Amino acid sequence: MKVAAFYHSLASCWNHGNAHFLRGVATELIERGHDVTVWEPADGWSATQLVAEQGPEALDAYRAAYPRLRGRRYDLARLDLDEALDGVGLVLVHEWSPPALVARIGEHRDRTRGYTLLFHDTHHRSATAPAEMAAYDLRHYDGVLAFGAVVAENYLAHGWARRVWIWHEAADVRVFAPRAEPRTGDVVWVGNWGDDERTAELHELLIEPVRRLGLRATVHGVRYPDDARAVLAGAGITYGGWLANHRVPEVFARHRVTVHVPRRPYAQALPGIPTIRPFEALACGIPLISGPWRDDEQLFTAGIDYLVARDGAAMQRHLRAVLADDDLARALARNGRATILARHTCAHRVDELAAILRTLGREDL
């Protein structure tokens, strides 16, 4: 089947976590014999910021890591949907797409009836900015893929869509797997500072526990202002800057434990949604300690797959325990990865997508 996906970016993961899951799903579809094209805006902010900060070679590194993935850049004013969607059987449109594009594709689908059309939501705006989501015209879409039950409920409650399926993110285990690397540090965190959505949480659950325990720690990510970098330095934490997502497994392998610090909108407004980072960390076989979030959909088993730190004191206790007890660290790493392999890989999600399409009468994915 020919598949077309309209996302903010395939090539850039600079402050753009949706690229992680998209790459894994696209790879899985290609491995199963499907023809996948990802359309991304020519002026997308993620790729623009990446090139401005890291240079065009950063995009070349992505292409080397994912040689089979194919992206095409579009100018919305010049995009010919008849050409772009010729012979396509499935179209996925991500919720960061411009409302004008979302509407145009819906109108094209209504006119041609030639493909299945699904909207994909992987963000908290359905809960935190419902007026923005109401601007999307989904009348001619076959349904919505929501990355958590709360998001699905929001679509139905607001009447934004007739059909919604829960489609969680997952790990691309072709990329995210244990690696053999020399250990150079104790704690690593990969995540962006951005938007003041977890500033207090980062201080309580990462910076202060590391400082008090005197651990060797590294942080990777973007949008760290000068004052944030100064705080990290004051706690003895190395700021490593932007890290290409496909290089995360080797960085995890150089450290003994990682943490997850949920953004406030997910922890408070969207319980049950862990975002992509915990999936990837567990897939890499590194012990994970998470800040509090409610696993309402029972994706993992707290205390078995990972540990939960309700506050800074608990994080400090858990870090000390994992770093001192090799058996505990190995058990967490083993259990977490086993859960990913059993339930949460991109192959599982493509299987789920195929089942969704079957309910819509399409049997060829």
Image: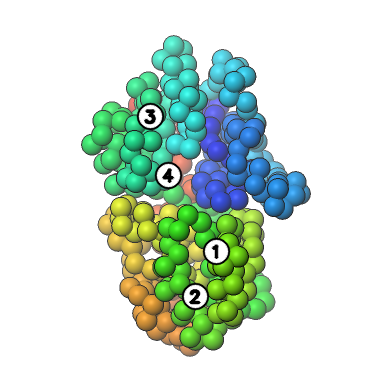
User: Between tags 3 and 4, which lies in front?
Assistant: 3
Q: What residue type is labelled 4?
A: Thr
Which residue sits furthest top?
111
Q: What element carries label 4?
A: loop
Q: Is mark 1 on a helix, strand or loop?
A: strand
Q: Name the residue under label 1.
A: 190
- Up the image or down, 309 lies above or below 297; here it is below
Looking at the image, is mark 1 or mark 2 earlier in the sequence?
A: 1
Q: Name the residue under label 4.
A: 122
Q: Distance between the residues labelled 3 and 4?
A: 17 Å
Q: Residue at x 44, y 49 (%)?
A: 169
Looking at the image, is mark 3 or mark 4 earlier in the sequence?
A: 4
Q: In this view, does 311 lie to the left or right of 10?
A: left
Q: Distance between the residues labelled 3 and 1?
A: 33 Å
Q: Mark 2 points at which residue?
A: 207
Q: How crowded is mark 3: few (under 14 residues within 10 Å), some or many (20 or more)?
A: some
Q: Which amino acid does label 3 sit on?
A: Ala
Camera sees residue 298: no
Looking at the image, is mark 2 or mark 4 earlier in the sequence?
A: 4
Callouts 4 and 1 close, C-beta under 8 Å? no
Looking at the image, is mark 2 or mark 3 earlier in the sequence?
A: 3
Where residue 132 sits, quadrant-wise, is: top left
Q: How far apart are marks 2 and 4 (CA)?
A: 28 Å
